[in-house]
Image (cartoon, rainbow, N blue to C red):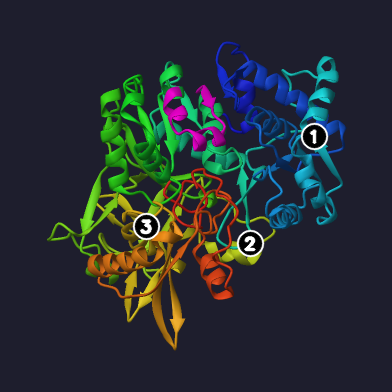
C-alpha cells in the first residue's frame, strides 16, 4: 500500500490503458488514464506552486465538473497544497446563505485562494470580500492553460516539486462536515489516514480485485463518500472508476443502472434514498434491457438504512440479474476518514428485529412479535481498528445494550482543524466518540440514532428515524422527507412531526401521521406540520436538518422553500459513510 496519496498517483503512472471515465451531462465521456491523471496532476501542482502556493497552504475548491475537480484536487495534493472541497451552487437562489457558508469554510481553513470554473465564478465572487485569508479567485481554465505551458518544464516522474517532500503524517485535505448547524467543522485527514482507510474498505471490506473490478459512482465529489470512496480509495488500490454527474442521477435514476450495465461495473455505493428512488421510478420495461449480474458490491450508507428499501430494490431488479448478496450496509463518518464498519461482502443484508419498548430503555431485546423495530446490521470493524459501545459514564456495555459508539485505529483523524475544544470533546484517550447510539450483537454493529437527536418524552427514549419512517410510508407523504423532534410545551417535551406533501392533502395526512405513529410506536403526537415540497432544510449532502427544522418552526419560517438537497451519500450529522453515518 503506498504511504501517501501522491505515492499512489505515481505508482499508477505507467498505466495508459485504465483509469477514470467522466460522463458529462450530455452523455459524452472523457477518459483519463492513470498515466494521464499523474501527468495532469503533476502539471497542475506545478502551476499552483508557480502561483505562489507552498506546502501546507490551503486551497478552497468549488468545482462542479467531475474531471476538473479530480484533476485539480490531485494537482494540489501533488504540490503538497491542502485542498478544501466545497459544494458548488449553480443558481442565485438563497445565494446569500451559500456565500456565508463558503466564506465560513474559507475563514476556518485559512484558504489562501479559491479555485473554481469560469461558469461558476459569478456564484462565488462575492465571497472574496467576506474571507480575509483569500488572496485570489482562480479558474481551472486558467490553471489548465498554465499547466500546459509548464508541461515541458515539469518532470512528471519526479515529485511535483523538488522542494516538496510529502510524508504520511502530512495533512492531505480538510473535509468540512455538513452537520446540522451553520458552522461546519474541518476534519483533518492525513495521508496516513487515507492509506489506512483505503486498505480497510477497499481490501478488507470489499475484497477488491484489480484484474476485473470497476467502480461506478454518481456521488458528489465534494463529499467524503464520493471523494474517498471512489477517487482516493481506488487510486490507492488500482481500481478504474466511471463517474456520473450527481444531477444526472437525480433527474433520471435509471442512468446509474444503465452505466453499470454499459461499463460492466462491479462496485457501486449509494445512500438509502437512492435505492428507494430507483425502486419507485424504474419501470418494468426499463429493467428488461439491463444486465446487472456484474454487480459484485452494492454498498449502502451515508444515512440510516431501511431493510424494506433494500428489499424492494432487490426485488425490483431481480429480473435484471441483481444479486441481493452483493448488498453491503456500512457505517462511517468523516472523523474516521470514511468507513468504520462494513458488512461482509457476499453475505447480503442481515437484520435484527427488536422490541420497541425495550429499545426505548436502551436494551435491544429480540422482539417476540412481528411488529418489532427492524434494524440493519452495518457489519464489523476492520483489521487494526476497534469499535465498542459505552454508557454515559464511559463504561463498556455488553451485547444488546445501547450506548454511544466509539472507535479507534489508524483511520481516525487527528481532530478538527484549529478547533482544540471540539477536538478534545470528540477525540478522547485515543477513541473517537462518534455521538451515535448503537449496540453490538454477535460482533455485528447496529446503529440506532444520534445522541443529540434522541427524543425523550416522559422518560422514554424515541429515535427520530423510527418516527420518520412510519410517517414516510403513508400515501401522500414524500418518502424520506419527514423530520421528527421534540418541543417544550409548558415545561413538558412533546413530539412534533414535519412532513413534505401537497397542501391539499394536509388535513387528512396530519391525522393519518398522528394515528400511525401512535399505533406503531405508542407515542402521542402533539403537532403534525405539513409543508410544501422542498421546504425542509437539508445539509449540503442531502440530509434533513432536525435542529434547524425545529428552529424554523419556532421562527415561523418553516413553510418557505429551502435550498434544494445536494444528494450524496450524505449528514444531519447523523449516520452516514462520511459525516457521521451509516456508510
Which residue occupies the extreme top position in the image?
17
Query: How far across and down, in percent of the image, does residue 173 sit?
Result: 66, 43
Residue 353 image-quadrant placement: bottom left
Q: Which callout, 2 or 3, points at the residue further toward the start of the chain? A: 2
| Closer to us: 465 or 32 | 465
Magenta stretch bounds: 239-258
Considering every residue shown, the one lying at the far left of the view is 368
Could you say which disc has been placed on residue 182 in the image? 2
Residue 550, position in %: x, y?
51, 70
* Residue 161 in sight in this render: no
**Which residue: 87% across, 47% down?**
135
The circle on residue 388 is 3
Q: CA distance from mark 3 to mark 1?
A: 46 Å
Residue 256 part of the magenta-drawn span: yes
- Viewer-nearest residue: 480 or 459: 480
User: Which is more toward the observer, 220 or 534?
Assistant: 534
Q: Using the numbered discs, state the Cα–Cα distance from disc 2 to disc 1 in whole angstroms.
A: 27 Å
Say if mark 2 contacts mark 1, CB within 8 Å. Answer: no
Residue drawn at 66 percent across, 62 percent down:
419
Q: Visible in this render: residue 309?
A: yes
**Was residue 236 drawn as part of the magenta stretch in this picture?**
no
Amino acid at each position: 500500500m503506498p504511504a501517501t496519496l501522491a505515492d499512489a498517483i505515481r505508482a499508477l503512472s505507467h498505466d495508459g490503458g485504465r483509469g477514470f471515465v467522466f460522463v458529462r451531462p450530455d452523455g459524452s465521456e472523457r477518459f483519463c488514464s492513470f498515466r494521464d491523471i499523474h501527468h495532469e496532476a503533476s502539471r497542475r501542482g506545478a502551476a499552483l506552486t508557480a502561483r505562489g502556493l507552498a506546502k501546507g497552504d490551503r486551497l478552497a475548491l468549488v468545482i462542479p465538473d467531475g474531471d476538473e475537480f479530480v484533476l485539480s484536487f490531485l494537482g494540489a495534493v501533488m504540490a503538497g497544497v491542502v485542498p478544501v472541497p466545497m459544494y458548488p451552487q449553480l443558481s442565485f437562489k438563497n445565494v446569500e446563505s451559500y456565500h456565508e457558508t463558503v466564506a465560513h469554510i474559507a475563514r476556518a481553513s485559512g484558504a489562501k485562494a479559491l479555485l473554481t470554473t469560469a461558469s461558476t465564478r459569478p456564484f462565488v465572487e462575492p465571497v472574496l470580500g467576506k474571507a480575509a485569508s483569500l488572496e485570489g479567485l482562480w479558474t481551472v481554465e486558467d490553471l489548465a492553460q498554465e499547466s500546459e505551458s509548464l508541461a515541458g518544464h515539469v518532470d512528471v516522474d519526479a515529485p511535483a516539486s523538488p522542494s516538496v517532500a510529502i510524508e504520511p503524517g502530512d495533512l492531505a485535505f480538510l473535509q468540512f462536515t455538513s452537520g446540522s448547524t451553520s458552522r461546519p467543522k474541518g476534519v483533518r485527514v492525513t495521508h496516513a489516514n487515507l492509506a489506512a482507510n483505503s486498505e480497510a474498505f477497499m481490501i478488507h471490506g470489499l475484497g477488491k480485485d484489480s484484474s476485473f473490478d470497476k467502480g461506478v459512482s454518481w456521488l458528489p465529489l465534494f463529499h467524503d463518500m464520493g471523494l474517498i470512496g471512489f477517487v482516493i480509495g481506488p487510486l490507492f488500490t488500482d481500481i478504474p472508476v466511471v463517474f456520473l454527474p450527481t444531477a444526472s442521477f437525480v433527474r433520471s435514476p435509471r442512468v446509474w443502472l444503465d452505466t453499470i450495465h454499459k461499463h460492466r461495473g462491479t462496485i457501486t455505493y449509494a445512500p438509502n434514498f437512492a435505492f428507494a428512488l430507483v425502486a419507485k421510478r424504474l419501470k418494468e420495461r426499463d429493467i428488461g434491457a439491463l444486465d446487472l449480474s456484474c454487480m459484485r458490491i452494492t454498498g449502502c450508507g451515508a444515512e440510516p438504512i431501511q431493510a424494506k428499501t433494500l428489499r424492494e430494490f432487490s426485488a425490483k431488479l431481480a429480473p435484471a440479474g441483481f444479486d441481493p448478496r452483493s448488498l453491503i450496509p456500512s457505517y462511517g463518518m468523516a472523523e474516521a476518514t470514511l468507513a468504520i464498519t462494513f458488512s461482509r461482502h457476499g453475505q447480503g443484508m442481515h437484520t435484527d428485529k427488536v422490541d420497541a419498548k425495550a429499545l426505548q430503555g436502551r436494551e435491544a431485546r429480540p422482539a417476540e412479535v412481528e411488529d418489532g423495530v427492524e434494524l440493519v446490521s452495518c457489519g464489523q470493524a476492520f483489521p487494526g481498528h476497534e469499535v465498542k459501545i459505552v454508557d454515559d459514564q464511559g463504561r463498556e456495555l455488553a451485547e444488546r445494550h445501547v450506548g454511544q459508539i466509539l472507535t479507534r485505529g489508524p483511520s481516525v483523524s487527528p481532530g478538527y482543524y484549529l478547533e482544540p475544544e471540539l477536538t478534545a470533546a470528540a477525540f478522547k484517550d485515543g477513541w473517537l466518540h462518534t455521538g451515535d447510539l448503537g449496540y453490538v450483537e454477535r460482533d455485528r454493529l447496529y446503529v440506532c440514532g444520534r445522541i443529540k437527536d434522541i427524543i425523550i418524552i416522559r422518560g422514554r427514549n424515541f429515535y427520530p428515524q423510527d418516527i420518520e419512517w412510519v410517517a414516510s410510508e403513508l400515501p401522500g407523504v414524500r418518502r424520506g422527507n419527514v423530520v421528527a423532534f421534540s418541543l417544550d410545551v409548558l415545561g413538558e417535551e412533546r413530539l412534533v412531526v414535519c412532513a413534505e406533501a401537497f397542501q391539499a392533502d394536509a388535513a387528512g395526512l396530519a391525522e393519518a401521521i398522528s394515528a400511525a405513529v401512535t399505533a406503531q410506536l405508542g407515542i402521542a403526537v402533539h403537532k403534525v406540520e405539513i409543508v410544501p415540497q422542498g421546504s425542509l432544510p437539508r445539509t449540503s449532502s442531502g440530509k434533513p436538518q432536525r435542529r434547524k427544522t425545529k428552529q424554523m418552526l419556532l421562527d415561523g419560517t418553516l413553510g418557505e422553500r429551502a435550498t434544494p438537497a445536494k444528494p450524496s451519500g450524505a449528514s444531519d450529522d447523523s449516520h452516514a459513510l462520511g459525516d457521521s453515518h451509516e456508510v
